[in-house]
Image (cartoon, rainbow, N blue to C red):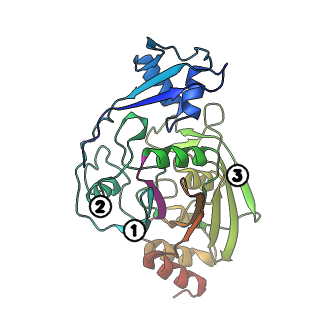
Amino acid sequence: MKEIEERVEVLIVRQAGDRLDVYVAGNSDLSRARVQALVADGRVRVDGHVARKADRLEVGQEIEVRVPPPEKLEAQPEDLELDVLFEDPSLLVVNKPSGMVTHPAPGHPTGTLVNALLAHTDDLSGIGGKLRPGIVHRLDRYTSGLMVVAKSDQAHHALSEALQRREIKRLYIAASWGHLSESPLEVDAPIGRDPVERQRMAVVEKKGRHAVTRFRVVERWIGAELLRVALGTGRTHQIRVHLAHIGHPVVGDAVYGEGWERGIGGKARQWARMLGQKVGRQFLHSWRLSFEHPVSGELMRFELPLPPDLQTCAEWARKDCVS
């Protein structure tokens, strides 16, 4: 990856009365939190004097912002297969396969999407102070499908802000055990770290973060259903946690739904056991992604059908045959 040097931005105040951090964030590709961190490090000056984030500005003042180069990751480029559906100077849209971790983490230092991206291009964003190669949002390891990756700080900032404003639309296909009580169904339940098992997420009423997921049944099978899922928020494991919370975990989910099919009784028991054996991973796929291009403003929309492994399971399930 090419070396990234410190950059210096100079802004001339055109409007009086704004707080320093608000003004700089609104007139650059830096987030307000990033501006505040730079101010705390003494990297922002107003008319040559070290600034404070709450300083009120006057027309004509000169603001100098010194942005240090992002901290480098230990991740190395790896020549891994990367399915790129779209690419321009600002961003990429990729199809992440099941089994690939999004970025390096304990236990997964290599073989990640980040490693593949580093080999694919030198132009990846370093917004936020660390060289996080373009990652705007994540997919779980065993979730497949569409992701958008930023190639510039400007694109990363714009896409991250759009994600927070819920302007990036992400739709998923999932299979869940049992049958929902109603369709469409909205689940509004806060999500946080499981207080007992810290590696898991859970619905946590008092300390959880606001989370909303909307489900619609598109196919009703013997002991499960195929759902279209829309995210109202973007919490870790949100779809999986919400479905498990209402008693209909994702088919094949080894964390939140392991062995759940054994609880299905009657004529559906054998069918559910067979489906559980056929599904080799969680039945969850990011199939549609739409957003406004951060530079051109063009509406970008991408769709991906179910990958072969999930498509094969769905074709078997909809036959309603038990052998």
Few, some or many residues within 10 Å of mark 1 (<14, 14–19, 20+): some
Earlier-in-chain disc, 1 versus 3: 1
Of the pair 105 and 217, the residue shown nearer to us: 105
Prevailing secondary structure class for the magenta stretch in the rendered image: strand
Whole-number angstrom distance, CA of label 2 to CA of label 1 = 10 Å
Of the pair 95 and 154, the residue shown nearer to us: 154
Earlier-in-chain disc, 2 versus 1: 1
Q: Are marks 2 and 3 in contact (CB under 8 Å)?
A: no
The kind of residue tagged 3 is: Val
Earlier-in-chain disc, 2 versus 3: 2
Residue 107, image x, y percentages:
28, 47
Whole-number angstrom distance, CA of label 2 to CA of label 3 = 39 Å
- Residue sitting at x 45%, y 57%: 91
SS of the residue under disc 2: helix
The kind of residue tagged 1 is: Val
Of the pair 99 and 321, the residue shown nearer to us: 99
SS of the residue under disc 3: strand
Q: Do the residues labelled 2 and 1 touch (CB within 8 Å)?
A: yes
Q: In this view, does 119 lie to the left or right of 63?
A: left
* Residue 189 on the magenta span: no
Residue 216 occupies which quadrant of the picture? bottom right
Residue mark closest to the camera, 1 vs 3? 1
Q: Mark 2 points at which residue?
A: 120
Rendered view: 49 above or below 237: above
Rendered view: 86 above or below 51: below
Do we see residue 253 in this rendering?
no
Rendered view: 205 above or below 116: above
Q: Mark 3 points at which residue?
A: 187
Q: Residue 121 carries which label?
A: none
Magenta residues (range): 145-152
